[in-house]
Image (spheres, rainbow, N blue to C red):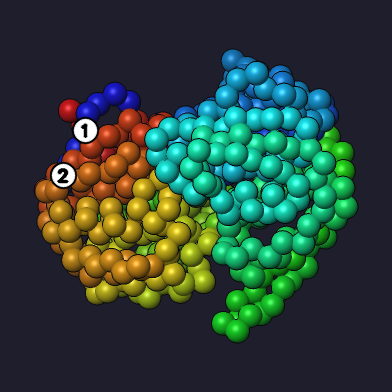
Amino acid sequence: MSAATLTARPSGPLTGRVRAPGDKSISHRALILGALATGKTRIDGLLESDDVLATASAVAAFDADVQRDNDGRWTVTGKGGFDQPIEIIDCGNSGTGVRLLMGAAAGFPISVQFSGDASLQGRPMGRVLTPLGEMGARWTAEHEGRLPLTLEGGGLKGISYRLPVPSAQVKSAVLLAGVNARGTVEVIEPEATRDHTERMLSAFGAVLEITPEGPDASGRMGRRIRMAGGQRLTGTDVRVPGDPSSAAFPIVAALVTPGSQVTVEGVLLNPLRAGLFETLREMGADLTIDNAREESGEPVGDLTARYGRLRGVDVPPERAPSMIDEYPILAVAAAFAEGVTAMRGIGEMRVKESDRIALMAAGLQACGVQATEEPDALIVTGSRTVPGGGVVRTHGDHRIAMAHLVLGLGAQTPVTVDEPGMIATSFPTFQALMAGLGAEILEA
């Protein structure tokens, strides 16, 4: 996508059935675990976004054989570990990719230079480097806790690590490092986060012990994950389900565009990723699930969204880990909901690809919506009529861009976003998929 801007115009009813692109989190993990394993891993439905393709290039640089067939299936042939790369591992814009790759690489006696684009170089890596350092990894960086940095791995020992903040990326980095560590690796999460790494490690043959933890003083339940180090992984077949973070955009577009009915097939419905759908139902959304089933150890189903009245709600802060990437599009749904929607406990949004709290507040305000930001909160006062008409600065953040384009479909006047090329980092088919449903999203 090379356009300087994209403009979404108020559309007639959106209708049709589409399939969400493959889940980004699972796509990253399938490539990395395939490279850590011995033998072939066949991956169907891999998300071919810029972020995931950067991870594919990275595992190839660690000397895994990575191939894409003409039918879109990917095959990763691993040798049971990572070899010394001869080039810098450039992870582009992907925070998930670089943090998980650092964890995996830390288990081997290699020296790896990690880098990324300007946005990724501004994002903190210290929360991953701290436990890896306690396990025995070393690193050097020009700017403490930031890319570019050089990681020295090998000789890792077991660890019992309590996550200071909920983070599936940190948990995953520790577990991936633990695959080639001596002793037992234990991660204690006071609040449960997405569990794709645990599920996929088991699918590749690892043995994990997972027990409940808590509740804490706030009544939140966490988990304790234990895994013996030095386990052997074996290649397997992986079918990547549809990404709920991507499915959220056509789903919310249908909810806010009069007369719409849209079905998104094959969406991942893992309970630790379904917070947005739970919240939308609390807002009164007409959202149903059909054909519920299991694929590659993950629950999936077909979601149908129909236009209707929405109402403002208070989103429980403890729900944030299950929907942290979906708050931008939730804020758009809130703009069309009658009353106040309060999203609290979302300070993590300030250290994503951008400061998403600030950018969503500014974008909504530019479109005539009352929005207030707090240090770890976004408060939106919505109505059934949204003026639109804004030109939104995205700072290169794909989710900010897509969220405001969805807003433009249901608003009274068009909405324009800048830097739309970054949408390809997670959802390269976004514009075409939305057009197939009847959305008018134009390049300029």
Horizontal side of 334 relative to 265 (left or right) equals: left
Residue position for label 2: 391
Q: Position of residue 355 (x, y in %)?
A: 35, 53
Spot the residue most to the top.
Answer: 70
Mark 1 nearby-residue class (10 Å; few <14, some 14–19, many ≥20):
some
Q: Nearer the viewer, residue 312 or 65?
A: 65
Sequence order check: which comes first, mark 1 or mark 2? 1
Horizontal side of 351 relative to 9 (left or right) equals: right
**SS type, badge 1:** strand
- Indicate whether 401 appears above or below 163: above
Amino acid bearing label 1: Thr
State the residue at coordinates (52%, 46%): 144
Q: Position of residue 383 (x, y in %)?
A: 19, 67
Q: Quadrant of the N terminus?
A: top left
Amino acid bearing label 2: Val
Q: Position of residue 123 (x, y in %)?
A: 46, 46
The span from disc 1 to disc 2 (Cα, nearest Å) is 9 Å
Residue position for label 1: 5
Horizontal side of 370 relative to 83 (left or right) equals: left
